[in-house]
Image (spheres, grey):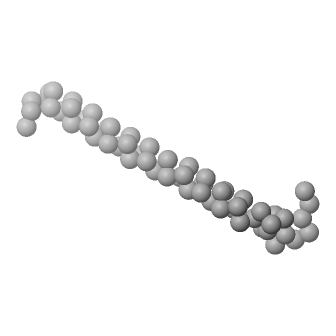
Amino acid sequence: MQWGSVSEFMVMGGYGLYVWTSFGVSAFCMLWEVFALRRRHAAAIAETRESIHDQCVGPR
């Protein structure tokens, strides 16, 4: 497709709201997944370190 202006591109033949909303929701979900993975990774590292410390020193 060819668009004559940026506003025509944003409207996308009347489907712009659907397209850009879908794009935004998808981008948000992908960013949220990266954030959640980093939090779970940090929690797993902390739990592993605590477990190793408990095995070496004994329970608290």
* Residue 52 appears in the picture as rendered: yes
Residue nearest the viewer, comparing 58 with 11 = 11
Taking the spot 92% from the left edge, 60% from the top edge, the residue there is 2
Q: Quadrant of residue 5?
A: bottom right
Q: In the rendered image, which quarter is residue 15 located in?
A: bottom right
Camera-side residue: 44 or 55?
Answer: 44
Residue 9, relative to residue 1: is it above or below? below
- Residue 19 spot, x, y in % from top left: 72, 59
Q: Quadrant of residue 28?
A: bottom right
Identify whether 53 is placed above or below 39: above
Q: In this image, 14 relative to 48: left or right? A: right
Q: Is residue 9 visible?
A: no
Q: Residue at x 38, y 47 (%)?
A: 39
Decide if residue 23 is on the left or right side of residue 43.
Answer: right
In the rendered image, the quadrant that contains the N terminus is: bottom right
Which quadrant is the C terminus positioned in? top left
Foreground pick, 20 / 40: 20
Q: Position of residue 18 (x, y in %)?
A: 70, 61
Residue nearest the observer in this picture, 5 or 38: 5
Q: Total label count?
A: 0
User: Which residue is at a point 15% across and 31% down the rendered structure image?
Assistant: 54
Residue 13 pos. (x, y %) = 84, 65
Residue with the most extreme top position: 55
